[in-house]
Image: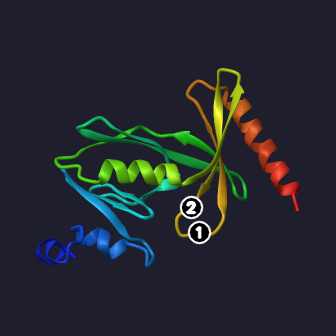
Amino acid sequence: MTGFWARLLGREPVPDAVADALADSEAVVATAQAPDGMLVVTSWGIWPPGGERLGWHEIAKATWDKVSLVVTPTSAEQIAPGTELLTDGRPLRFRLVEPGKVPQAVQERVTQSIRTRNRRELPGGGVWVLQRRVPGRDGLVLQVRPDPGTDPVAARRLAEGIAARLQEEP
């Protein structure tokens, strides 16, 4: 639903490409205009202008600096079923003309996707061990997210050890 009808019904305007790609149980929460298109926030993640959805479990962090929303995406390597080793991607900056509810909605949903959070110190830094909800799926995924500079071998070893212990549990 776009333009006139969206405003008339009190709904957020959504680009047709995003509206057509939404999952059945995915709801639009907020939108904001960026110079290159509409940024759409849903119950499942962020739809950047002209891009694919970035799920809440795929975002390491999101910040708002009064002008731009900065989102750090992650890529995940499956260590074992239900256990992932994350790598931070290049931060994405979205300059928002009128941010409205977007910064708050993003912050809340990234935080709500995390069920547990534990810190482990390793050579060169540390890792966050997170249990997160994945939109549209039952259960949790365990993610190991190293800080920049953390020994990658130590981070992988920790992720593999956690995965092995989880597989042993009944």
Which residue is depicted at the point 16% across and 47% down?
97
Q: Which numbered tag is attached to residue 4? A: none
Residue 169 appears left or right of 125:
right
Out of 110 and 86, give the one closest to the viewer.
110
Q: Residue 110: x and y, percent? A: 47, 50
Q: Residue 139: x and y, percent? A: 66, 65
Q: Which amino acid does label 1 sit on?
A: Arg
Label 2: state its secondary structure. loop
Distance CA(mark 2)–CA(mark 1)? 6 Å
Out of 51 and 136, give the one closest to the viewer.
136
Specify the quadrant that holds the C terminus.
Answer: bottom right
Tally of numbered tags: 2
Residue 35 appears left or right of 124:
left
| Quarter of the view holding residue 93 | top left
Residue 64 appears left or right of 54:
left
Q: Which amino acid does label 2 sit on?
A: Val
Determine the residue located farthest toward the top in the rendered image.
124
**Can you say whether 50 is above or below 129 in the image?**
below
Q: Residue 25: x and y, percent? A: 45, 76
Residue at the disc numbered 2? 134
